[in-house]
Amino acid sequence: MKIKLNQKQKVTLYIGLFLIAASLVVWIGFGAEIFTKTQVLVEKTDDLFGTTYKEFENKFVLGLDYTAAFSFAVLLITSIIIFFQRTNKEKEL
């Protein structure tokens, strides 16, 4: 079964695909972590004694969990918009 899309539906589809691709690129840019992190363990050096120690630093790292939820929401909203952008000829089928 071949689905024919009108011009508005194609533009909506392309925008939705662009948003999903952009979210994946941002996720990869943050390091492609599985889970979102709000703190990162950082190794620091003490200037006085020259020893190293580990400390948590407040830093946001986007994870796949938020990215997947955003992509699913975009997919759902895009599908609904495409459904309501049908022309009268398509509604009769």
Image: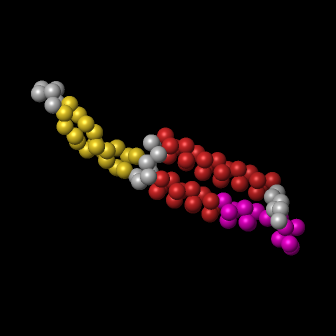
Q: Residue at x 68, y 63 (%)?
A: 79
Residue 84 position by quadrant: bottom right
Quadrant placement of the N terminus: bottom right
Q: In the drawing, does residue 89 fall left or right of residue 65?
A: right
Q: Residue at x 86, y 73 (%)?
A: 92
Quadrant placement of the C terminus: bottom right
**Relative to residue 6, is residue 40 depicted above or below?**
above
Q: Residue at x 55, y 47 (%)?
A: 24
Per the picture, the main secondary structure of the magenta-coloured stretch is helix
**Closer to the camera in the image, 39 or 81:** 39
Q: Position of residue 16 (x, y in %)?
A: 65, 53
Q: Residue furthest bottom?
A: 92
Q: Residue at x 31, y 47 (%)?
A: 39
**Relative to residue 72, is residue 22 depicted above or below?**
above
- Whether the magenta-drawn stretch holds residue 89 is answered as yes
Q: Position of residue 76 (x, y in %)?
A: 62, 63
- Magenta range: 78-93
- Whether the magenta-drawn stretch holds residue 26 is answered as no
Q: In the drawing, does residue 7 fall left or right of residue 53?
A: right
